[in-house]
Amino acid sequence: MPLRRRQLSLALGGILAAPRIALAAWPERPIQIVCPGPAGGGMDTYARAIIPFVAPRLGNATMVVVNRPNASGQIAFESVALAEPDGYTIGVAQTPNLVTLPIERQVRYRVQDFTFIANVVEDPCALFVRANSPIRDMAGLLEAAKAKPGQLAIGSAGIGTDDHLLILALQQATGASFSHVPYSGTPPIINGVLAGDLAAGSFNASEGIGLVRQGTLRLLGQGGAARWEGAGEIPTFREQNIDVVAASIRGVIAPPNMPEALRDRFREAFAGALADPAWVREAARLSLPLRVMGGEEQRRVFLEDDAKLRELWKRAAWRE
């Protein structure tokens, strides 16, 4: 073979082999999991819990949760969207939050551009009060709200979150009017309820069920189509004649344009972890309501929510 042709052949061979070598060596540094909620919240809980089951399936990778709860999760979602698709940055995300932000404001991402990896949880929306609150049930909450329209304070994790949309749905379904108080995540809502600054807190069932069992909070109602078995004694809103169904669907996403080989490696790792009986037991211990989906099904569900929420925004914009 002439020298020039041989040199070209070797050069092309090196270029074609490079991705395989890089992928075989990957990961060479820690993988960041960007979380749009604060430490101790529902998003943070499942992100940290799944790491021991996923990391061994990714070459014993070091995986680190990075909490960026500001701006209702916008900063977290944008940091994933703008990251290099090299596998060193992924994120946890939920609908409706990921979906509502681009509808209500200018953001630096499009939902359909993310690489979807797996869904983990479907957590019913719920309303909680202090255990010693005079409000004993949903009927009592609605009675108190109607006695003082617009004054009964209910906290949420921010405008456009599932917590906020629950409050709006309850107002529409019942005719009651609440005072909405947005926070940055669930822990400060709980603090507000316990301190008496809020009459009630709107957050997900799994995030408060531990305090219910401890006798600190009371759960008034849950937003699933059926009762979550972790709170099987608490009726749904529909069972209380309030036609509202609401939940947070939470999963794992990655930056846009992730190479297929790397995307599939993540998908296989999470699929294996989520099918692991040890993970299922750990999820039950942590009171996580599981809804496992592969990346393609997860993408379909998120985009269906995108379409539905864009129609809702046209009818009744939720931004305050």
Image (cartoon, rainbow, N blue to C red):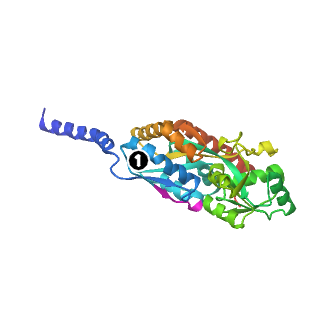
Whether residue 172 is visible to the viewer of this picture, yes or no, is yes
Q: 136 or 249, which is in the foreground?
A: 136
Q: 113 or 213, which is in the foreground?
A: 213
Q: 289 or 79, which is in the foreground?
A: 289
Q: Amino acid at mark 1?
A: Gly
Whether 315 is among the magenta residues is no
Instruction: Label 1, secondary structure: give it.
Output: loop
Extent of the magenta region: 65-71
Quadrant where the C terminus is found in the figure: bottom right
Q: Name the residue: 80% across, 63% down.
A: 150
Q: How many marks?
A: 1
Q: Which residue is mark 1?
A: 87
Q: Position of residue 160 (x, y in %)?
A: 66, 55
Quadrant where the N terminus is found in the figure: top left
Q: Name the residue: 65% across, 61% down.
A: 190
Q: Residue furthest front?
A: 214
Q: Position of residue 61 (x, y in %)?
A: 37, 47
**Vertically, is 32 above or below 192?**
above
Q: Residue furthest right?
A: 147
